[in-house]
Image (cartoon, rainbow, N blue to C red):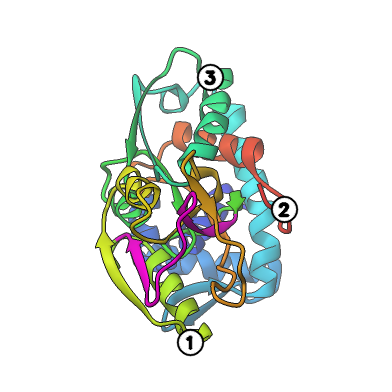
Amino acid sequence: MLDIDLLRSFVAIVETKSFTAAADVVRRTQSAVSLQMKKLEDQVGHTLLLRESAGIRPTPEGERLLIHARAILRAHDEAIREFDRSALPVGSLMLGISADYGQALMTRVLAVLRRAHPDLMVEVVCGPALHLAEMCGDGRLDIAFVGEGEGLGQSPIVHRERLVWAAGDGAEPTEPVALALPPAEVCNYRRWALDALARAGRRHRIAYTSYSIAGLQAIVRSGSAVTVIAESALIPGMREIRDPQRFPELPPIEVRVTRCLAKDSVFLRNLEALFVDGLAVEPAAIT
């Protein structure tokens, strides 16, 4: 029989990629968590975790167990939901989502919330993905929807869409290409754009930098520069540049939901599972 506490510690280790951080989540000492993992590996007869320079990651057997562990924990938490006050909705929820892909994802997120918790007060924080990941990590957010490469954890992808090159309607890109991009420290878009232009041998310059998606949209609509943006964030006055020779294809935007592990509770675990069940996309699908 697999022990619930062992499975919860195992999932916490995979999500945090650290025995130390997982110990904080499950409120045990690091040595106790290590002993739990030894016991769990003895029970299943396989090595479940590997230590690497980037942190702890599951072995192939660990990945298989992770699927079952999450399902078991979800069923367990649902079973005690009626009797555990920590499983009840909090008065309000701090939710983080990027204003870029949030334009397509937000309606789906709110629909899931409205069906499950129609009276829950939700405060939405929009910002760069990296900032949202940090805010979720230190407890300023309860739940965050974070783009790939920004501290994703191990949850399934709940939103995927194309990242596209965009110019103003009727505007032709200059030579060298004038770019309007977010700062390098807030997301991967800037690096992806510059790497793609370098591979294509295109001369370019950073003409404008803005934290704000609305600011980037306004710059592009004026015809002053080219940007990279989520397909769903294209608005009237902007057009997608379809010229793969001069503007190579960019990586897709892939978004996962993550809860604040520092505020671990049955309610937040259930809510994260609710979003995964209600929003998860197929691996090859483009929303």
Whole-angstrom CA distance, mark 3 to mark 1, is 49 Å
User: Dot 3 lies on which element?
Assistant: helix
Within-10-Å neighbours for mark 2: few <14, some 14–19, many 20+ = few
The quarter holding residue 126 reads top left
The residue lying at 40 percent from left, 82 percent from top is 203
Task: Tell me the mark number nearer the camera, choosing from 3 and 1.
Answer: 1
User: Dot 2 lies on which element?
Assistant: loop
Q: Nearer the viewer, residue 171 or 79?
A: 171
Within-10-Å neighbours for mark 1: few <14, some 14–19, many 20+ = few
Expressed as whole percent of the image width and height from the top left, the position of residue 87 reads 47, 27
The residue labelled by disc 2 is 285
The quarter holding residue 163 reads bottom right
Q: Is residue 1 visible?
A: no
The residue lying at 53 percent from left, 32 percent from top is 109
- Report the amino acid beneath label 1: Gly
First along the sequence among labels 3 and 2: 3
The residue labelled by disc 1 is 201
- Report the amino acid beneath label 3: Arg
Whole-angstrom CA distance, mark 3 to mark 2, is 25 Å
Q: Is 188 displayed left or right of 208 in the figure?
A: right
The residue labelled by disc 3 is 114
First along the sequence among labels 3 and 1: 3
Q: Which residues are the magenta region?
A: 162-182
Task: Tell me the mark number nearer the camera, choosing from 3 and 2.
Answer: 2
Q: Is residue 57 visible?
A: yes
